[in-house]
Image: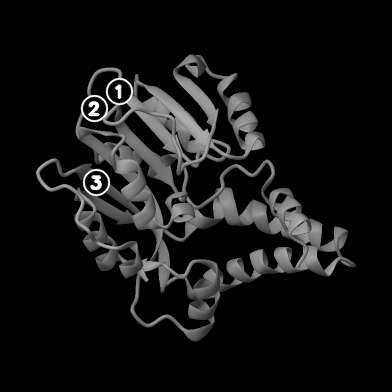
């Protein structure tokens, strides 16, 4: 496959979508409300913010300052356009940066937020990388694709073995959270509808448009059809996996164990 074509088509598929993963403002609010009161004017990071629907909602929910981080500048531009329509845009700073190499001091952040983005570093890798940035009383909230049932059908196993081989069960993720120096305080599963309204439905419309546009380009079609396959599998097998919000606090009494990230798989 031509990687340049694959990269370009991927971002054509995802350009100007409301979100880059399942969720909506209601569930961002639900997760936020499971936190205890934050310190006055807290410092927040929204990592892998995408176009920033949840960033804007977080700014409504807190009086703190949010740094919204993404590597793809067009997503940050989309966020800035949304912020320009509010009266709190000065409390949000879009920042183009790598989530694995963040330019923040240790123990400087009150809350790290990551909706659907931790998988980029793998869930355990993200928790391990980000923990040092949090204050000893800090919190991390992440939504992560998770096996809900222990017996997924073979087509689902095959697809996710290729796309995200380190997807874990709820129980395994809770164990991982504890082993990496956090206290799990709450979790909840996003309903099926949260996948479709702001993510899969507009993405599927884009897929149909680009299928016609790239009908004679096999490399482009491979990327497009992989997206359609993902949606088709979820439509049929949503009982077996889903996105779970995990809310956790730094466990200042128990630093991260020597648990190897290799044990995730």
Q: How far is the residue under mark 3 from the one under mark 1?
A: 17 Å
State whether residue 260 is above or below residue 51.
Answer: below
| Residue 204 placement, left or right of 220 | left
Image location of residue 101, percent across then percent down: 45, 39
Mark 1 touching mark 2, by CB under 8 A? yes
Pick whichever of labels 3 and 1 is earlier in the sequence. Answer: 1
> For the point 24% across and 41% down, which residue is it?
34
| Residue 40 placement, left or right of 115 | left
Mark 3 touching mark 1, by CB under 8 A? no
Comparing 195 with 106, the one in front is 106
Disc 3 is placed on an element classified as strand
Image location of residue 126, percent across then percent down: 38, 50
Q: Quadrant of residue 218?
A: bottom right
Image location of residue 210, percent across then percent down: 80, 57
Mark 3, residue position: 248
Mark 1, residue position: 42
| Residue 220 placement, left or right of 226 | right
Q: Is residue 190 visible?
A: no
> For the point 64% across and 29% down, which residue is it?
77
State whether residue 88 is above or below residue 207.
Answer: above
Mark 1 residue crowding within 10 angstroms, few (<14) / some (14–19) / many (20+):
some
Disc 2 is placed on an element classified as loop
Disc 1 is placed on an element classified as loop
Q: Residue furthest left?
A: 253
Image location of residue 80, percent across then percent down: 60, 25
Mark 2, residue position: 38
Mark 3 residue crowding within 10 angstroms, few (<14) / some (14–19) / many (20+):
many
Q: How far is the residue under mark 2 from the one under mark 3?
A: 14 Å
Mark 2 residue crowding within 10 angstroms, few (<14) / some (14–19) / many (20+):
some
Pick whichever of labels 2 and 3 is earlier in the sequence. Answer: 2
């Amino acid at each position: 496959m031509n990687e340049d074509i694959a990269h370009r088509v991927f971002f054509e598929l995802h350009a100007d979508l409301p979100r880059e993963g399942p969720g909506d403002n209601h569930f961002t609010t639900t997760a936020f409300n499971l936190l205890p009161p934050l310190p006055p004017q807290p410092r927040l990071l929204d990592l892998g913010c995408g176009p920033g629907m949840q960033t804007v909602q977080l700014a409504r929910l807190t009086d703190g300052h949010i740094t919204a981080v993404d590597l793809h500048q067009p997503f940050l531009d989309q966020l800035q356009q949304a912020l320009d329509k509010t009266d709190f845009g000065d409390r949000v700073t879009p920042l183009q940066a790598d989530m694995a190499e963040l330019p923040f001091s240790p123990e400087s952040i009150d809350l790290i937020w990551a909706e659907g983005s931790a998988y980029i570093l793998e869930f355990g890798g993200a928790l391990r990388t980000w923990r040092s940035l949090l204050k000893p009383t800090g919190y991390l909230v992440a939504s992560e694709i998770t096996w809900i049932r222990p017996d997924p059908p073979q087509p689902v196993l095959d697809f996710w073995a290729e796309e995200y081989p380190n997807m874990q069960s709820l129980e395994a993720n809770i164990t991982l959270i504890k082993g990496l120096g956090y206290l799990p305080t709450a979790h909840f599963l996003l309903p099926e509808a949260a996948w479709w309204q702001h993510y899969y439905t507009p993405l599927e419309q884009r897929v149909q448009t680009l299928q016609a546009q790239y009908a004679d380009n096999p490399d482009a079609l491979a990327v497009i059809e992989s997206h359609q396959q993902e949606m088709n599998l979820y439509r049929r097998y949503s009982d077996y996996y889903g996105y779970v919000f995990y809310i956790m606090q730094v466990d200042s009494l128990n630093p991260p164990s020597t648990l190897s990230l290799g044990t995730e798989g």
